[in-house]
Image (spheres, rainbow, N blue to C red):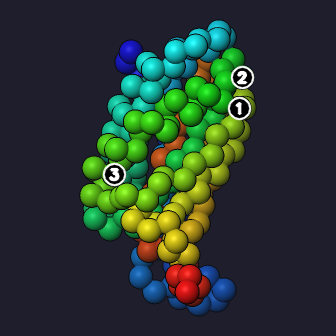
């Protein structure tokens, strides 16, 4: 089954000043959303293996789009996360099938990073639903200075028969981070 993409939307956030202080180094994050048709909208299906297989293609597409929007090379990416909003004619399990079993491998390959899990959130919602994608360090989930989030919404998505899948990438961690790693 091929991915039917209606649109791609990216939000890029670069922080230069925080709490009246200049932020040292680049602190940038992006959330890129792909709005796609949900082939199982409106019906229950036992076998979601086609959505699982689509997840790898979706991961490849999202990492390519997110890196382009981020405007930095893959080797600078230090954090990642993912999210999905399923339209009201679908179910949360559709999001899980798309963004869990096969989605991460092409993202890790493109970034040359991993093996830390790619944290996620999933929601059921309608057009304009705002979703928060968590961010954690690509190699070590316990790097506290990389723990962050970015939110995104698309005014006309997801429609009932769509899924809005999101990949978030970060460079440099939170502005003014100073927590470090656990002892």
Question: Mark 1 — residue?
Answer: 124
- Bin the neighbour count of mark 1 within 10 Å (Cα to Cα): few under 14, some 14-19, many 20 and up: some
The x, y position of residue 171, in whole percent, is 42, 68
Taking depth in this image into account, of 127 and 78 the one nearest to the observer is: 78
Taking depth in this image into account, of 65 and 63 the one nearest to the observer is: 63
Taking depth in this image into account, of 60 and 91 the one nearest to the observer is: 91
- Up the image or down, 3 lies above or below 73; here it is above
SS at badge 3: helix
| Nearer-N-terminus badge (1/2) | 2
Question: Mark 2 — residue?
Answer: 88
Q: Could you tell whether 174 is left or right of 123 in the image?
A: left
SS at badge 2: loop
Q: CA distance from mark 1 to mark 2?
A: 6 Å
Question: Mark 3 — residue?
Answer: 108
SS at badge 1: strand
- Bin the neighbour count of mark 2 within 10 Å (Cα to Cα): few under 14, some 14-19, many 20 and up: many
């Amino acid at each position: 089954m091929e991915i039917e993409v209606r649109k791609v939307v990216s939000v890029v956030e670069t922080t230069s000043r925080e709490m009246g202080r200049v932020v040292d180094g680049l602190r940038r994050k992006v959330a890129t959303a792909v709005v796609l048709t949900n082939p199982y909208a409106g019906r229950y299906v036992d076998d979601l293996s086609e959505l699982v297989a689509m997840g790898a293609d979706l991961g490849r597409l999202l990492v390519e789009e997110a890196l382009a929007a981020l405007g930095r090379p893959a080797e600078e990416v230090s954090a990642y996360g993912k999210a999905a909003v399923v339209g009201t004619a679908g179910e949360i399990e559709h999001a899980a099938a798309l963004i869990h079993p096969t989605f991460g491998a092409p993202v890790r390959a493109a970034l040359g990073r991993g093996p830390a899990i790619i944290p996620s959130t999933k929601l059921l919602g309608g057009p304009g639903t705002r979703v928060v994608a968590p961010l954690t360090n690509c190699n070590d989930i316990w790097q506290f200075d990389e723990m962050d989030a970015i939110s995104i919404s698309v005014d006309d998505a997801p429609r009932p028969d769509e899924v809005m899948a999101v990949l978030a990438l970060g460079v440099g961690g939170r502005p003014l981070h100073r927590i470090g790693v656990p002892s």
